[in-house]
Amino acid sequence: MLSKEALREIEAARAEEESARHALLTALRTVQRERRQVGPEEIAYIADLLGLSPAVVQGVARFYDQITETPTGQHVLSLCRGISCYLCGADDVAAEVRQLLGVETGGTTADGQFTLRLVECVGACDRAPAAMVDDRFVGPVQADTIHALTKL
Amino acid sequence: MAQLLTRNVLDPAQRELQTALRSGAYLGFKQALSLPAHEVVAEIEASGLRGRGGAGFPTGRKWSFIHAALDQPVYLLCNADESEPGTFKDHYLIERDPHLVLEGVAIAAYAIGAHQAYIYMRGEYASIAETLARALGEALDAQIVGPNCMNSGYDLRITIQLGAGAYICGEETGLIQSLEGRRAYPRVRPPFPAVHGFLQEPTVVNNVETLACAARIMAEGAEAFKDLGTKQSAGTKLISVSGAVERPGVYEVEMGHPLMEFLAHEAGGVRRGRGLKGVIPGGTSVPILTAEEAAPLTIDYESMQSAGTMLGSGGMIVFDEDTRMPHALLRIAEFYAHESCGECTPCREGTGWMAWVLRRLLAGEGRPDDLELLLRVGDNIEGRTICGLGDASVQPVRSFIQKFRPEFEALLPKEEQGTLAWQSHGHGPRSGRFGSPAKEAMRSQAVDGPPTAAL
Amino acid sequence: MPIVTIDGRQIEVEPGTSVIQAADRLGVEIPRFCYHPDLRPEGNCRMCLVDVEGFQKPVVACATPVLDGMVVKTPHESSVASRAVNGVLEFLLVNHPLDCPICDQAGECSLQDFYMHPDYGQHPSRVDPVEKVHKRKRIDLGPRIVLDQERCVMCSRCVRFSEEVSGFGELQFVRRGNHVELTAFEDRALRDPYAGNLADVCPVGALTSRDFRFKRRVWHLSHTDSICAGCSTGCNLRIDHFEGRIERVVPRRNPDVNRSWICDEGRLSFRRLAGAPRLTRPRRGDRELLWPEAVACAHESLQTASTARGLPLLAFASASATNESLWLIRQYVEAAFPEHRLEFRLDRETEAVAERQDSLLRRADKHPNTMGALHLGYGRGVGLEGLVAMAEKGQLGALFMLYYPPLVGEESEETKERIVHLLQLVSESVVLTTHELPYLADAKLLLPVAAWSEEEGTYTNYQGVTQHAGKAVSPQEAVRPATDVLGDLWQCATAARRPTGSEHLFREIAASVPAFRGLSYAALDSRAATTYPPEGRMHYGQEGFAGR
């Protein structure tokens, strides 16, 4: 299910930490990165790998916004809807981007390239309205900035 | 402007160890290592440093709570989960001067007798974590941290852990739970982390900026730090200002700096020359100030407290005269409803309820007593929850309604409509009427759905 | 030791005692969902908020340690606490489906009971039903448990039980805020052999027992305290019955024995009683007998086959018999048969009595009274296998047997064969038992006796703790408690009447057998557990309604 590199990462976390449970957060992040989701199959896999009950893994997985139940596109476009971004017109940008990409919030573009998310304050309020493309901060964004980004 | 933490941030090379060393990095740690740990704690206590994460608890005192048995592990956790809306100071501090943060971590760990420190960063800061990890690698290679730090005989392992998107992980016990691989449900206190923290062992959790201050204090002395700022608020504060201002960004100000002067000069004034309507001084979890209230204040703990608000995280959010306050409040209320971890009853149910009532008000479906309802719900949350998120969620609701009441009252239905629309008696499906198109629309909007569809 | 005042009443407690524990000891009611005496306190429900003098805001009684001189006021005495608790209760109902009329928890639902309480409930609703967050209902989690997510108050008792007590970790919360749901991964059937406890710890109708739900409204049930006869642990339980039929069995709390738990096998062991046809009348061969005839016949034929032939009588009683029955058998045998052996071991009970089957409660010895049998002088000889060998050599005159089929597990084939073999070898056999069992078919005379739950008595568990089990239901007409039958046999042997009431018999035991010295039914009951439900359900119903 996972690449050797990802497995090494999880194993390293497990070796370094006090208990298997302790490596769970890293395991979830790693699996999300590789599989672009942590669905039931991934949960069962992680549970097996770390010797935890799948319910426990699921409970933790379904706590965090960045761990998704269904697959994301190749990239995740996160539009910040924090209060500062809101004050700088994030709503309008979000509406335009939805139209531009032809997807609703949470949806993935037809070509599977981008999943559009609206997220709470990402901590880049000086760039409001801010966005993230995967782990990269961008902003201030407008619909055409996003357009340019999605055409890369 | 006082420059304590931000001295070197404009130099991109500061991220590299050689440059950082030339600017004095790790001199504070070296100084700390030359002292017994309790003297380091005493120095920090003498400096008057208070926590920069939001609560403002005296840092030295927090460290002094650690009384570990021999052979008992102690942990230092650096809280880099920075998720308070409008706060992005730690983001830039780590990005621009990672060695300063690492130095602070090392000093605190040494002071409390920890040999393992974790830097817990919010998942969204993955790219910044890379910068920090590179710096940590350099510091390890240079044997500044790691086994036998700077030949002192002191061993310190520092681990960077990334979160995965949950505001509550910035709450200290939520952070501990998350780090342990659990749902980040905060823990009921007592016991406090200083007694039973990470893995049930004595633990200190400090904010990034706090630790950076500690690094400067050890390098330059408690007196130098105390000379800055006011009597109760020593040193400087990083202010991340955003919203309706011309020059949003992170600025370092000496404690006691006049608020309006900061907004006018550093922040470049309210954008497009509009008038100031209000300002939240320390992240959305503290009460908003009207322009009038803000005018005489200075940036420090006591001045903010005198006006009934808090310095908080220093995440300053500026509202101009065009802002529709009920709409802005809904955005904030939705944040708390979305981020409530769901562990304890008042916060789990109350945050969602407040957001719901605001949403229906803005959808023209309000009821005559909705403002009272919002305030009462807030009263029932405040002081009744496991952690501070519940209290935090109430501050914006209460302060917005109190201070901008006419805007909210304008949303209330005319009386004759209201009484017909809603009867608040009994429960069960027979009471009240329901199923209007507007309500159906609201119902279909999950908390994590599009935020403003109902607006 | 710290002294605390709660609602004007004082109590001295050990350091570290929480306010709620102190209040429980005083009998001051503090409402709660998440607190449970056998689970780690979590403080999440906030129902136990109390007002403490000198504290700025209400604190949770479950996680606040008592300090010396503390003055606590509960919602009964303090308007601050009352308002706080009322606020919490209102929050709990915001997204609750309010489907009480069709909820089988009604009658033992904490949420319902607390809402009816005049000190913090009975507020009008401020929530429109359409505003509620909806979740899934009637989720099948295997043979024991049904989950209703909407009714869950997120107290996490079940999650903690599953993680900390049984260790299976099969229930967890997912999502956040008011969307938090209790769930089992992919709705998988629970594998936990203690899953039944999840319904017990659930203070509301979120987790209900598949076995019991919709069988009977709880207010129709009568209750009898008893002891599980499924293994040597001797878990304390309560039999809930209606018109002479057992409807369910629930644990009673006993911190020294089973805390608040029982295993599913023990919980359902009462079903075994109806699992095979009962022996209903005394029977010799194909001929049914009336009791006086049967008793006389039993005594005489045993005498003829053993004493008269100078051969010993083997008195064999399984360790599922009560101490009282074992004692009376001994009395009878000692009075009537100069040559006798007392045995109880069908298998390796004495070795297995304390052997664990798992890390929680279940033990390898499936008899509730092995220790009692040992204390009463049984089993000092060669065991069933040795006795079969003796019978083969013609060294046994007759067999007198009191046998109860196991309520958990099955007798091994080997044991059954040995019993069959023994019955075939001895020339005379009188067997007192509960069911028509193929491996007892060769008994010359069969006498029907009351089963577990149909007679009163005591069992001594693997720790040596003697516990009292009450009589919940009556046996069928011709079926008599073993002690009654034994009393009649004793009368045949001695021509004297003797009292056979179990309490009287126990007094005799306590007076004669060192291991039981100083014990009495009254002492056993006072030492025994609090009544089920262990925590959290207080029944205000009647007063609540009356007060309005």
Image: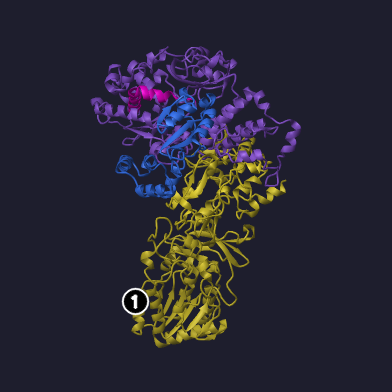
**Depth check: B230 or C301 in front?**
B230
Compared across the picture, whether C356 is left or right of A118 comes to left
Q: Nearer the viewer, residue C281 or C400?
A: C281
Q: Find out whether residue B228 is within the magenta segment.
A: no
Chain (purple): B
Give chain C's shade: yellow
Q: Is residue A121 above or below residue C135?
A: above
Q: Of helix, strand and loop, which one carries label 1?
A: helix
Image-quadrant location for residue B145: top left
Q: Front-most of C261 and B142?
A: B142
Q: Is residue B379 above or below residue C140?
A: above
Q: Is residue C348 left or right of residue A81?
A: left
Q: Amino acid at mark 1?
A: Gly
Image: magenta residue range: B86-109
Q: Residue furthest right?
A: B416
Examine the rendered structure and indicate whether residue C73 appears above or below residue C442.
Answer: above
Residue B351: image location, x then y, percent? 57, 35
Q: Position of residue A151 (x, y in %)?
A: 42, 32
Chain of the residue under label 1: C
Residue B104 on the magenta span: yes
Q: Which residue is mark 1?
A: C386
